[in-house]
Image: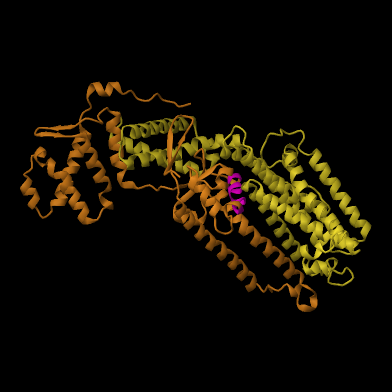
Amino acid sequence: MNESVFISTPDHVTLEFELAGPGSRFSAYVIDFIFNVVLIVALALLLYAGGVVFSLRSLFGAARGGSWSTSWTLALFLLLVFLINWGYYVLFEGLGKGSTPGKKRVGIRVIRQDGLPIGLREAALRNLVRAADMLPPPSYILGGLVMHFDPQGRRLGDMLAGTCVIVEKFAAGAQGATGAAWASRVEQGRSREALTLPRGAVSPAQLGLIERFLARRHELSKERRAQLAWQITEPLLTVLGEDRDAVARRPDRAERCEELLMEIIELAQTRKPMPAAAAAKPMPPPGLF
Amino acid sequence: MPSAEEKLAQWTGFQQRAEALLRAGPRALRRLRGHEITRLLDDYQALTADLARARSLGAARETVDQLNRIAVAGHNLLYGRIRRREAGTGAPVFGAFAAAVRRHAWAAALSALMFFGSALATFVAVQIEPALGYDLLADEFIDFDPATPENLHDIPSLARPVVSSMIISNNIQVTLLAFGFGLTAGIGTTVLLLFNGIHLGSVAGWMTLHGKERALWGWIMPHGATELLAICLAGAAGYLLASALVAPGRLRRATALKRIGGQALTIELGCMAMLVIAGLIEGFVSPSGIDYPSRIGVLLGSLALWAIYFFGAGRSRNENRAEPSGEKSNSGPTP
C-alpha cells in the first residue's frame, strides 16, 4: 500500500490523505474489542443488579422461579448482545463520521473514496462483511493480504463500501503564521527572491530553512534547538553585520540566534513587493460557481 | 494583496466557520445569507489556490498539511450535501428489497439450487442408503421421538421469548456469513448453503424414513417458508458480491464491488427483517398447540404473502436504485 491517497475534487483541487497502516488499524481494533466486551459485561451486570436470574433452567416452569419479566428481559439481553457484536462498528462509524472509540483514540478515521465522511450505508457495508476479512477466523489473514496488495490499503469490506482508512491530522498551531507568511510572499511574487541586505543576501533556500526551523523549534529538544539555531545563523552573521566570535561567546547564544532569525523573516515579510511581480499575479476571480 | 496577518486570519477564519457549519449540520448551511455564502466560496477558492501554490512551489511540508486540512473541511462542507443526494441514501423504500431480488433473480436461483438442491439430494440419498443418517445427523435427531414431552413442540411458554431471540440472532448470523463469504468469490457462501442444505435434507430424510415426518413438518411449516427463503436470499446477496469478483466485466474488481454493494446490502437487510418475522413465528407459533391443518394454513399464508411481495412490491419505482431497505411492514403471520 502507498503512504497517501490523493483525491481530485470537481473544482480541480487535490486533497491529500495519509493512509492508516495495518499497525494503527489493529491497535484500534484491539481497543474496540475491549470496549465491546466491557459494554456487554456492563449490560449483564446491570441486569444482574436489577435481579434478573441468568438461568435458562428457571424458564422451564414457574415452579423453578421463572417469571415472564425474567423471560422477556433475557430475550432482550440476548438480542442486545447480538446487536452490540454486529452493530458496534456500524453505529459508531455510521453516526460518528467514520470513527469508533478505538479509532478516535488511535487517531484514524474511515472516509469515502471521494473524501467525504461516511454514512450508515458505507458503515454497514464495510462492517457486515467483516467475516470474510477475518478468514480464517479470527486471524484477519485474508483482509490483511488484500490490504497489503491494495494501493489504498483497503480490506475487502472497504472495497465493497468504497471507503479507506486515513490518519486524522490535528491542527498544530505553531507553523500557521509561517505558512501564511510564505503564502502571502508567494502571492506577491516574491517566493524565489533573495533578501538583499547592505552586506550581502539571504538566499530563498535559507529563508525557507529559517521559516521551517522557527515553526518547529518548540518541538525540538533544548540542546538540538540551540545547536540548530547556531548552525543556521552562523553563516549569516557577516551579512547581518554581527561579530561572529562575539556572538559565539555569548552565554545566551541560542536565544540571540533565534532573535536574529526572526528579524530576518520580519525583514523578508515587510519588503515592498516588486511592482512587476505584483502586477503579474492577478487576484483570483471572485465567485466559484 | 493580503499581508501575512490577513492571510492567516483568512485561513483560520475559514477553517473555524467551515468546522462550525459541519458540526451544526446541513440546516445551518441552508440558513446562510447570500453574502455569507459568497464569502465562504471566495475564501475556499483563495485557500485552495494557496494549497495548489504551496504544493507546486514547494512550501514547507507543515504548510501544505495545514492548508490541506482546511481544504478538506471546506470540501466536506461544500460537497457533502450534493453527493449525499446523488447517493440517494434517503428514506428506505418498502419495495427496494423485492426489486433488488427480482433484478438479480439469477443469484436467487443459484442460491436456491445450492440450498434446496443439496437438501433434496440428501433426502433422496438417505432414503436409498439409510445408514447415511448416522453419519450426517447428531444424536438428538436420531433419537428424536415425537411422543416424548421433550420434543420440539413442547417449549414451555416461559422459555419462548428467549428461544425466539436466540433463533433470530443465530439465523441472522448465518445470513451475515452467507453474505460476507460472497467475497471469497462465492466459495464460502456455497459451502455454507451446501452445509445447511445437507443438514435439512438429512433430517427430513431420516424422519420420513422412520415415520416421524408429520411431527417434523408440523414443526417446520409455520416458519419454514419465511426462514428458508431468507437464508436462500442471503446466499443470493453473497453470490451478488461474488459476481463482482468473478465476472467484473470491463470494470476493475474493486469498482464492480462498489457498484453492486448497495443492491447486495438491500437484500441482506431484507433477509434480516424476514428472519425477525420467522424467529417470532418459530418461537411462538411453531411450539404452540395449534393443529396440523392450521400449520399448513400458516405455511400457505406466508408463502402467498411473500409471493405477492416479491412479485409485486416496488414495481412502479425505479428499479435501478440501490437503497438499503428497512423492510419490516410485511405482515407475515404473527402470533
Q: Tell me the shade of chain A.
A: orange
Identify the residue at image location x=28%, y=40%: A178
Residue sitting nearer the eye, A153 or A267? A153
What is the number of callouts on the image? 0
**Rendered position, B287 above or below B9:** below
Identify the residue at image location x=91%, y=61%: B214
Q: Is residue A194 left or right of residue B101?
A: left
- Is residue B294 visible in the rendered image? The answer is yes
Residue sitting nearer the eye, A17 or B196? B196
Residue sitting nearer the eye, A103 or A65? A103
Span shown in magenta: A121-131
Which chain gets the yellow colouring? B
- Quadrant position of residue B133: bottom right
Is B255 covered by the magenta stretch? Answer: no
Identify the residue at image location x=62%, y=56%: A86
Q: Is residue A7 left or right of residue A208?
A: right
Q: Is residue B38 left or right of residue B141?
A: left
The kind of secondary structure the magenta stretch mainly shows is helix
Image x and y of residue B88, in percent: 63, 37
- Is residue B324 visible in the rendered image? The answer is no
Image x and y of residue B83, in percent: 56, 35
- Quadrant position of residue B60: top left
Quadrant including the N terminus of chain A: top left
Image x and y of residue B334, in percent: 82, 55
Image x and y of residue B160, in percent: 78, 65
Identify the residue at image location x=49%, y=32%: B33
- Quadrant position of residue A211: top left
**Colour scheme employed for the rendering of this structure:** by chain
